[in-house]
Amino acid sequence: MQANKVYLYPVWVRLWHLSNALLCLLLIFTGVSMQYASAESPFIRFDIAVSIHNLCGILLTVSYLAFIIGNLTTGNGKYYRQRIKGYFKEIMQQARYYSYGMFVGEPAPFKINEERKFNPIQKLTYILIMYVALPFIFITGWALLFPEFIVTRLFQFGGITLTSLLHAMLGFLVSLFLIIHVYFCTIGHTVGSNFKSMINGYHETHN
Amino acid sequence: MIKRLITGKQLMITVFTGILLVFFSVFSVVSQEKANQLSEESLKCLECHGGAHYTLSDTASGDEVKLSMYRELRVDPLQLAGSTHGMFKCTDCHSSDYETTPHPVSVKFESKYACIDCHGGDEAYASFKFETIEEEYGKSVHAELLGDDFSCWSCHNPHYYKLSKDIPIVDRVAVDNEMCLQCHGNEIKFSDLTERELPILIDKHDWLPNQTLHFKKVRCIDCHAQQNDSIMVAHLIKPSSQAINDCVKCHSTNSILVSSLYKHEVAQQRNEAGFYNGIIMNQAYLISANRNYFLNIASIVVFGLTLLAIAVHAYFRTRKSTSNASK
């Protein structure tokens, strides 16, 4: 099948995406290692895991700020804006396609082009991850770097305990997102075309 | 009418003053009650030993002189009354020669009791295992290096000692660490015991991330003493070269803190799932040691369901591609 190519990912988006992916992977590996640390079988030595996790967290914050500034100053931000009216219907259409339509050869309900980089479900997921989960994970992560600023007690729980629980839960959520994200990236023109597009910048669509 | 007589501000001051008065009345009653627990004989001793000064009278001439009481001979009546040993009279532990004032020289030769002298072999105190504590202390760096210059009382003040089990863990950490810092944070007291230079604790612990937090939440003995599950508090203090400096000893589900600092709370609150998060989560945070049991289960279930959903989705996709290819 012939493919149309649309230039959707400028260099800065690709660089940001690459750094984001690498840092998130390192954060997940070190985070899991710390959470499940044991003296008998350390996945990554605890002090090394802590140092890498802290460093990557700081770098990810910088990378996130670059993403926000990029979205504010270039046209990339428009892909993350959404009208509420009719959005639910669009999500249901996309969900139907993912869970049924694509198995029976129906065309994708929302074509990807320069005006629409993400389908409605993608957009919702990215908005939630980028604008809700990540800010919270940064706030809780930075708070754990400077625990002296965390309230001592909140509702019978230690402030640090709650902060760290929230941080770990959000980390788990981002890990889940990453797995689903990678899987859905295989749903492209070919299995590898979406991965290729994050290298050359061109999104391939069906003719 | 009231509005005319007093302003809102005056009313607030009156109410606030009232509350303060009630508070101080209650406090003074409580204080009085504590002081009243002391025996008559003890109160008599405290007339001189309870403050910074005492008065000595010449019975022949009637002259009186006000003298300073050495700091190490002073006993705070309030703290004594609130202590575990507060109900004893002074001469239960000290020589009866002290009943004579001015005290005769013989009091200088009195033998000082150690914990084991009263508590050893006593069924009432069996759970404290004083014999094991004594044995462990004998092997400690303090006993080996300082010999008779060091005793139970070097760390535990017998006049103020009280059981710490009812104190919240965070406060208990502070109380426990204060014992060590009496000497290890005080150049004068340290030099009374050894000619060694007092190490700067901040520098010695510079490998430890978040030092302040660690010092607030962890006792010195958790890393500096050999843990012994059979006693409540480890007493075998090891040389600093043998102290734990491996993060995972604490930061793991088998954390040494669970077998030392939190041991008793853990034992009380451990449920059938071996879930000991309750107490630890309420008192402190320790990466990995207090993984939340229910969140662990939930995360495994959610993770498993996600992978299953992906596998099912991929299966139907593959089937569709195969059927397309065969057409």
Image (cartoon, coloured by chain):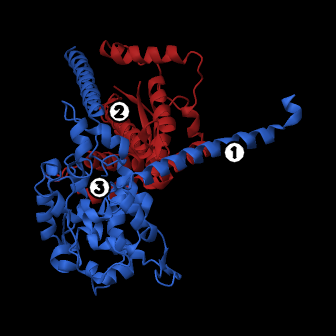
Chain colours: A red, B blue
* Nearest to the observer: residue A146 or residue A25: A146
Residue B226 appears in which quarter of the rendering? bottom left
Q: Tell me the CA gap for discs 1 and 2.
A: 70 Å
On residue B17, which mark appears?
1
* Nearest to the observer: residue A129 or residue B233: B233
Q: Residues within 10 Å of mark 2 (few under 14, many from 20)?
A: some
Q: From where the camera sits, is residue A166 visible?
A: yes
Residue A157 appears in which quarter of the rendering? top left
In the rendered structure, the answer to whether residue A126 lies left or right of residue B173 reads right
Q: Tell me the CA gap for discs 3 and 2.
A: 29 Å
| Label 2 sits on residue | A185
Q: In terms of secondary structure, where does tag 1 sit?
A: helix
> Amino acid type of disc 2?
Cys
| Label 3 sits on residue | A49
Residue at 43% x, 35% y is A203
Residue at 20% x, 19% y is B322
* Nearest to the observer: residue B17 or residue B284: B17
> Amino acid type of disc 3?
Ala
Q: From the top left corner, tell me how far across and down residue B304 is, in percent.
A: 24, 27
Q: Residues within 10 Å of mark 1 (few under 14, many from 20)?
A: few
Q: Nearer the viewer, mark 3 or mark 2?
A: 3
Q: From the top left corner, tell me how far across and down residue B98 is, in percent.
A: 32, 72
Q: From the top left corner, tell me how far across and down residue A99 is, in percent.
A: 34, 16
Residue at 16% x, 67% y is B137
Q: In terms of secondary structure, where does tag 3 sit?
A: helix
Q: Nearer the viewer, mark 1 or mark 3?
A: 1
Q: Earlier in the sequence, mark 3 or mark 2?
A: 3
Residue B309 appears in which quarter of the rendering? top left
In the rendered structure, the answer to whether residue B87 lies left or right of residue B235 reads right
> Amino acid type of disc 1?
Thr
Q: Tell me the CA gap for discs 1 and 3.
A: 56 Å
Chain letter behind tag 1: B
